[in-house]
Image: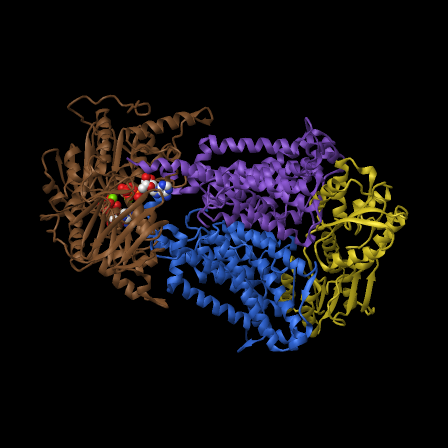
Chain colours: A yellow, B purple, C blue, D brown
Amino acid sequence: QETTVIGVSIPAATHGWAGGMNFHAQEAIDRLEATYPELDFVLATASDPAKQVNDIEDMMATRNIDALVVLPFESEPLTAPVKRVKDSGAWVTVIDRGLSEDGIEDLYVAGDNPGFGTTSGMFFKEMMPDGGKIVVLRGIPTTIDNERVEGFQAAIEGSGIEILGMEHGNWNRDDAFTVMQDFLSKYPEIDAVWASDDDMAIGVLAAIKEAGRMDEMWVLGGAGMKEMIARVRDGDPYVKANVTYPPSMSGTAIELTALNFVSNAPVSGKFVIGSVLVTQENAEKFYFPDSPF
Amino acid sequence: MAEQTTNAPGKAGFKFDLQALGPILALVVLVVIGTLLNPDFLGQQNITNVLSRSAFIGIMAVGMTFVITAGGLDLSVGSMTAFIAGIMIMIMNALIPSLGTSWGVILIGMGAGLALGALAGAVNGFLITRMGIEAFIVTLGSMVIFRSLVTWLADGGTISLNFALGSLYEPVYYGGLFGIRWPIIVFAVVAILGEIAMRHTAYGRHCAAIGSNEQVALYSAVHVKRVRMLTYVVLGTLVGLASVLYVPRLGSASNSTGLLWELETIAAVIIGGTLLSGGFGRVWGTVVGVLILGLIDNILNLTDLVSPYLNGAIQGVIIILAVVLQRARKSSR
Amino acid sequence: MAEQTTNAPGKAGFKFDLQALGPILALVVLVVIGTLLNPDFLGQQNITNVLSRSAFIGIMAVGMTFVITAGGLDLSVGSMTAFIAGIMIMIMNALIPSLGTSWGVILIGMGAGLALGALAGAVNGFLITRMGIEAFIVTLGSMVIFRSLVTWLADGGTISLNFALGSLYEPVYYGGLFGIRWPIIVFAVVAILGEIAMRHTAYGRHCAAIGSNEQVALYSAVHVKRVRMLTYVVLGTLVGLASVLYVPRLGSASNSTGLLWELETIAAVIIGGTLLSGGFGRVWGTVVGVLILGLIDNILNLTDLVSPYLNGAIQGVIIILAVVLQRARKSSR
Amino acid sequence: MQATTLQSGQPEPPPGQAAVPALALRNVQRSFGPIRILHDIGIELHAGEVHALIGENGAGKSTTMKIMSGYLAPSAGEILLDGVPVSFARSREAEARGVTLIHQEFNLAQLLSVEQNIFLGHELKRGWLLDHATMRAQTRDLLARLETPLDPRAQVSSISVPEKQMVEIAKALTRQARVLIMDEPTAALTNRETSVLFKQIERLKAEGVAILYTSHKLDEVARIADRVTVMRDGRIVRSALRGEMNEDQMAEAMVGRELSDMFPAKRPADGAPPVLEVQRFSVGDAVRDVSFTLRRGEILGFAGLVGSGRTELMEGLIGVRHSSGSVAINGAPVHLHSVEAAMAAGLVYLPEDRKEHGLILTQDMRRNLTLLALKKFSNLLVDKRAEEAALDRAIQEFDIRAPERSVLVGNLSGGNQQKLLLAKIMLADPQIVIIDEPTRGIDVGTKQQFYGFIHRLAGAGHSVIVISSEMTEVIGLCDRVAVMRRGRIAGEVQGMDVNEDTIVRLAMGLEKKGNSNG
Ligand SMILES: Nc1ncnc2c1ncn2[C@@H]1O[C@H](COP(=O)(O)OP(=O)(O)OP(=O)(O)O)[C@@H](O)[C@H]1O
Ligand SMILES: Nc1ncnc2c1ncn2[C@@H]1O[C@H](COP(=O)(O)OP(=O)(O)OP(=O)(O)O)[C@@H](O)[C@H]1O
Ligand SMILES: [Mg+2]
Ligand SMILES: [Mg+2]
């Protein structure tokens, strides 16, 4: 039986969400390899776009891949190299970040970044009908972060919610802790914090707790880290909700790609995984105790 | 006879003053700017925040001062912190079933952190002094290795301390004595001991002599390898100490823990007036350097004058300026 | 001490050989491993890939060899690449309305890239040689500044080249002469010129003299500042050249372009046998160092023996091993 | 001047006999690679005796001394301490057992202070901490005893060469040695400091220290040594007690032939046109308002005490120090803001500190030789064949003795380094040569060659400035002598006035004489 080689190229686990995404990819690969001996996977993780392009070139030159599952580090730089893979006749699955040219990929599995921002914004609007003062912690400066923040800003437009300050917490606990400490020094009155990511939310909560201002404000994180989901589920007054951006989409994409080779199911097309608001009512559904994220 | 020589020390004194004043001046300027921009800047809370979060870099920078003075370098401290913190947490979590949520577990974790730091420093030092490999390469290698190990241990995610134990451990970062937090106290003690060691012990002199001229030191019966080895072991132990204080803050370690701390640490040392080429080190200068770097971040967060995208640019300019202030025609390496 | 000196001259000849053979040996071992792991390793496609992507680091590393030989250092090359690439793209995009999608636009972009590189190098060099600030601090500062500027210019996202122009420009990376890609050709030319400049011109001698003993160089009519300045300008220009080749590869620049390239570049230089403390440089060694680093990544992609989380650990070990192979009791800085 | 630090710790040797030598070498050999440098060396040092080791450059004196003090291991043979064979694995051990070496090349950490250097490796402590007060006081005492009033806190990189030498001596004196080995301690010293050193040597000798000493200044050797051993080509050719050998015999034993007059006859250069005119020239605080003229074909000497500003004056002239005043070459005003500009104007300078300013010790002879005049050898590319040829010529002309051509300059003997340095600056083909301490560490035979060489240069129309702390050299060699004192020219002497008495008086400020300040 002919083996099918599927290359998987994803960004390295440099922050919590990416770590979860790596975990789900690895987990899907292990499972599929065990189930389907005819499938062979090649996993490479990259810490910058150039390295990712190198990885993809190597897969083409030395591993003869039949399919590529890629989560582009950035859209533009990866477009041409992925197109070359496509032109070589391989199957291409793109995760999360669309390429800058349409029609290259056979399968697109993505989260919805503007939607992530919008859902978060709607929640703020709902919680603060009379407006209020909030601070925002942004991620690493990237298109993703821009889209999320724009979605958020659009959603709270006209609600009377005032963004006192925005700084980059780089999806990092320590950076978020530092930034939040300084926000707390700077603004005597803060009603809520949009941390836009659960790693940052943890840093933010630590800073608020330390300043003894827990009762003044609540925090919305995002992306569904299991600890945070658990707090939502348990009714933590400071962590009322969460917004999903499931790292498991990597596993989904890999699985769908594999299905294309081992079954006749039609899998091409576009799967957008919407960002869902997680509240105490539905939290249990989003709790994955085995994930590292 | 050597009449002109009379001027030499005077001159030296003056030069010393200018060089010494440079970083202090930069620090004062930053404090003034901070106060003007935000009245809460000098508030007890903000000062406490800045000092205690600077303590990690600060503790390591004191150790780095000795390494650099002796002509070495260590690029691995940032990822070493992540690695040590990760292992500490794993050890403590593993001990809870048998020892319960107790200070005993925490003390074992702390001891492990310090021991691991000393060991990691000893490995670096061994490769550098005994195998004769350039410190840059050895510690670049160990930087990459430690970071990779912590990612692997965390399975790409975060290694988190058991919640109950974390709450018990928390006061080590957030608590203190007489209203002064532990990290600040520890940093101060380390800095004072470091200053004494540098200026008032034979060890400090030997470090400077080795950095100035290894051959001369060797001919003067200085145990060059032993002294140099010790600088790395001490630095490693201090990295362990920083990790001991770091873990209770957020109770976790991951791939991104301590990212770029090595550059920040080295920058603090050099801003403080220590020569990167070795031969001269100043621990109190390092402390000033650490505070300068800590304040830059703080001030940028306290104001909205510029796009946050440009924060880095401002940091860079201030780092260079702080050194321009102490530029005194030193060898331009 | 005594024992080692005994053999000094005899060893000197021997030492040179061992030192010179070290990196080559490491390279050969890597090639053998690669071939064993995957038969396609030595295929033309894979070799072409590895060489052409190594060209960026390689071109910069040749320039870095001179900087380090003259006792300097440049930490800014990675973010300088990002900055130059970003500006080049913005200039070219801006010219399309008036000049159309033409080679004219690309040539102007290339010229701008080279000029900007030379200028950035000159600014670094000016601060280092004229203001007398340590190279480490100046270039750490400019590293942070460039990265912040490119983030700002890209508004946090990516600066992308116009698609049509990108297609026109693409052959500069993917095309070539006689089946050899342009980046490889350019890298080879730069390396050969660098080797000649280092070994057969007054300039190379002067760099080594300055790095060995600045005072002696000064008394020997070497324009210390000018020579040192030139090393930074040349390096900047080569960074510009690398950017000129980089833009057609990815057609974009962002915050994460050229991340950590500075460390990779310096590591390549040192693996190649150049002394980080200055005074001795070897351009062909640098080329070997670049290839070693390029191959490590490539080989790790050839197999799935280890968790990708551990790639870094393997890289670190190989970097250290490559230098252990050439360890010869050099001053352990 | 309390001798607080300096107890020899040794019982006085019984007078009139010293049967067991304090330190001895027996049948010692030493090779570097395939080249044997020392053959069957046997030498004995006795307590309370000053033993001088003399020989040509490269004869193996420094190597012998390094073996005695544990810096080098012998390839064969024995080292006996108090008659017992020892092997000093490393110098720490030798030092611990009371054997101290003052190196020919300085061994001071440039970035450390005088006091830090003096006590390096032997810091005085109170408990864990350094005893700054005592160390500083002892440093002051020592320096005062050596009549070198330096600030203990001064950085070594900022003090002059003779001062560095005195710091080296002070460093050795703190070591409480019972065997003190000094490799050319007086090469960098003027007469005054030399006599200060000799006073210390006499004192140590009286305390029962065994002293081994090398010098190329044979008059000194005759004055101070109780026993003289002569080396030639790595062998001991003669050993004699005080009075058994006069200076001429020493020179002959060293060189292996008879030496004629040291100095060639002088030729007055009167009436020749001035080549270099310096007016109201100041360099920092060290040199104030100095004016002088140098004629074509003239040899102008600069004399003065340590720190009188001679070196700084010349460094100002060649543009490595900031200076003010006017300089004219061949009547045309020039601005010499860099060494290269000075070289282009025909002016070159041989630095006095060959290790810090003169040669790159980690490179080979060829690269060092051509560094200054590299332009001559490069026309786009460096012509290595021409360089090799130049090295051949230099080796011949200056009698440079190297074990092999590829040797690193740091491994050359001190005198041969100096010869290479001279060859290096002469390669620039200068019209005006400034030589700072030209014969530091050079043996008699070569010195004579040098003097002849300088004369030939002057005869060929070059002009030479010689800074020298060796009075005989200034007197024997120079047509005219400018004497500096405290950064000014205290006077100029010429013709019959060029004698020791006049120069010393001017240098000490005892007498105004001559047309002071030009
Ligand atoms: N490490 C070394 N490697 C190779 N050759 C060496 C080394 N050290 C010394 N030599 C050689 O040994 C010979 C003797 O040198 P040494 O320094 O003992 O001479 P010296 O008698 O002290 O001369 P001088 O009066 O010039 O100081 C010289 O030819 C020198 O080049
Ligand atoms: N870099 C420096 N910084 C401070 N003082 C210096 C420096 N260099 C020299 N001096 C001092 O300037 C004075 C003049 O030194 P210079 O070397 O010119 O004296 P000199 O007459 O040449 O004597 P000699 O060469 O015999 O020592 C000395 O006292 C010296 O200590
Ligand atoms: Mg000698
Ligand atoms: Mg002098």
Is D172 left or right of C58, judged from the image as shown? Answer: left
Q: Point out residue D10 in the picture as x, y percentages from the top left corner.
A: 27, 23
Quadrant for the N terminus of chain D in the image: top left
D214 relative to C129 in the view: left or right = left
Q: Does D292 appear above or below D118?
A: below
Look at the picture and state if B31 lies above or below D432: above
Q: Quadrant of residue A110?
A: bottom right
C297 relative position to D200: left or right: right
Image quadrant assignment for residue B100:
top right
> Going 51% across and 49% down the picture, which residue do you hit?
B136
Q: Residue at x 81, y 55 (%)?
A: A153
Residue C41 against residue A242 in the figure, above or below: below
Residue D511 % position (x, y)? 19, 36
Which residue occupies the foreground of this view, B200 or A157?
A157
Q: Nearer the viewer, residue C39 or C187?
A: C187
Q: Is residue A21 left or right of residue B10?
A: right
Q: Of residues D128 and D216, which is closer to you in this image?
A: D216
The number of discs equals 0
- Residue D87 in sight: no
State the image coordinates of residue B229 (x, y, percent, origin top left). Answer: 48, 39
Q: Nearer the viewer, residue A178 or D320?
A: D320
Q: Position of residue D460 (x, y in %)?
A: 17, 60
Can residue B45 be seen at all in this image of the molecule?
Answer: yes
